[in-house]
Amino acid sequence: QSAPQRTFLAERSGAGWREVNYQTVLDIVRSIASNLLGRGLDQETPIIIMSGSSVDHGLLSLAAQYVGIPTVPVAEQYSLVPAALDRLKQVIELVKPKLAFVGDVAVYANALSLDVLKDVEIVATEIGQESRATPFAEFLKPQAAIDLDNARAGVTANSIAKILMTSGSTSTPKGVETTQRMLCANQAQIADALPLLRDRPPRVVDWLPWNHVFGGSHNFNMMLANGGSYYIDQGKPVKGKFEQTLENLSLVTGTLGFNVPVGFAMLLKAMRDDRQLRHRFFEDLDMLFYAGASLPQDVWHGNATMAQEVTHRPALMTSSWGMTETAPAVL
């Protein structure tokens, strides 16, 4: 109502970005939700999302939450690494999804051939030449016969929004149910602790995966709750992919910077060698936020010094402790 034309979700498309504004997101979400309801999905029939962050991934997740259908985003490595397919199979057997989503059928072909998915409808952005998958584009056509608003009214604070899988570091992955109340309360808590979120709409260029609470619940919902813009970074702080992050930051930078310590260390090194990137990154930045490990003192000091040089004010740097079971922020 207040900023329908503001970008909410964006991903790289050619030399620029595919940007989807708030009004368009709402319209698409309602169309997708009507198709999900038309297939008989409800609180007892989760949707498993097997590929990484994308605009379509975000739209499907929001549509499911809009009418009370849980989503189960899993680490894309479960589908892409042959040795991890048994773990994917365990997750599917645990949650018993009625629908599965991937970005590209060809990329996820090995995972989609699992016997546990033979009775599950596959939906994909790219379906290739021959595939039993349903094109995601079909979900963009609203089903007029569906009473969407009635289903929407049935969503309560206790409705399960998503099921997140634990890492499985001590045993097989366990499913953590996240309710609508948990997500909403967590964002209210965060905004009370960080008033800058209410001062102006935040913006991020973020690579953190959505199967994890840091990227998928904390960061994604922070943009949604505060009218912000989420630019999906398909790069990562690893060799061979970090170059894409730097390219993305040459086009758009955030008002908030979320990362793990190794990511901030790689970015700091790149900014020392690139004055233009350094100025672009810090000139509109409100806060740096790290989690997952402690931030080395030299990385902290390097960012603080660089921010002071560019903006003539110290950089706000903060962290948070949280866990999958708490939606996630605790302190």
Image (tube, rainbow, N blue to C red):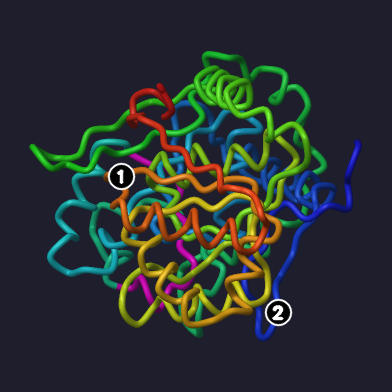
The magenta segment: 96-109
**Can you give x and y, in whole percent of width and height, for residue 288 in the image?**
52, 48
* Front one among 110 and 2: 2
Query: Residue at 68% of width from left, 85% of height from top?
Result: 15
Can you say whether 140 is above or below 228 in the image? below
Query: Residue at 46% of width from left, 47% of height from top?
Result: 215
| Horizontal side, residue 289 vs residue 295: left or right | right
Quadrant containing the C terminus is: top left
Query: Residue at 67% of width from left, 75% of height from top?
Result: 251
Q: Amino acid at mark 1?
A: Gly
57 drawn magenta: no
| Horizontal side, residue 51 vs residue 285: left or right | left
Q: Amino acid at mark 2?
A: Gly
Quadrant containing the N terminus is: top right
Residue of label 2: 16
* Mark 1 surroundings within 10 Å by alpha-carbon count, few (fewer than 14), some (14 through 19), many (20 or more): some
* Mark 2 surroundings within 10 Å by alpha-carbon count, few (fewer than 14), some (14 through 19), many (20 or more): few
Residue of label 1: 292
Looking at marks 2 and 1 on the same chain, the residue that comes earlier in the sequence is marked by 2
Can you say whether 222 is above or below 86 in the image? above
* Front one among 89 and 172: 172
Could you tell me which secondary element the residue under label 2 belongs to?
Answer: strand
Can you say whether 100 is above or below 156 in the image? below
108 drawn magenta: yes
Query: Residue at 70% of width from left, 73% of height from top?
Result: 17
Residues under labels 2 and 1: Cα distance? 31 Å
* Front one among 34 and 185: 185
